[in-house]
Amino acid sequence: MSQIPPPRPVERTPVDGDCPACGRAELTEYDVVGETGWTHVVKCGHCLTSARRTPAHRLGPITLLVDQL
């Protein structure tokens, strides 16, 4: 029986600005996966409101060698 590897931590990068919903300066950007695929989001760390959402790379944070050529 194979073991399931532990989850990889999500790297969140701080972003300048204030949350449009709560006004706090706790915005971070990172990639998330959902039903439509990977999305690059800027979210508030306090209330989790999405300040910005854009389509991300097809595999999110995973980079294939062929993509680096």
Image (cartoon, rainbow, N blue to C red):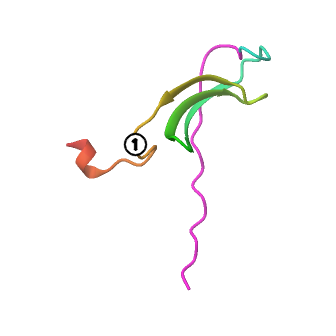
Relative vertical location of residue 49 with respect to residue 19 in this rendering, above or below: below
Q: Nearer the viewer, residue 59 or 16?
A: 59
> Does residue 63 appear to the left or right of 42 in the view shown?
left
Name the outermost residue toward the left.
Answer: 69
Query: Is residue 16 shown above or below 54?
Result: above
- Per the image, the residue denoted by label 1 is 58
Provide the residue span drawn in magenta. Answer: 1-19
Image height of 42 relative to 10, above or below: above
The quadrant in which the N terminus is found is bottom right
Q: Position of residue 3 (x, y in %)?
A: 57, 77
- For the point 77% across and 13% down, the residue is 23
Q: Residues within 10 Å of mark 1 (few under 14, many from 20)?
A: few
At horizontal 60% and vertical 50% (from top left) the residue drawn is: 9
Pick whichever, 34 or 26, lies toward us. Answer: 34
Q: Is residue 33 magenta?
A: no
Q: Amino acid at mark 1?
A: Arg
* Furthest residue in direction bottom, as rendered: 1
Q: Would residue 56 appear left or right of 12 to someone viewing this image?
A: left
**Rendering coords of residue 54 (x, y %):** 49, 27
12 is within the stretch colored magenta: yes
> What element does badge 1 sit on?
loop
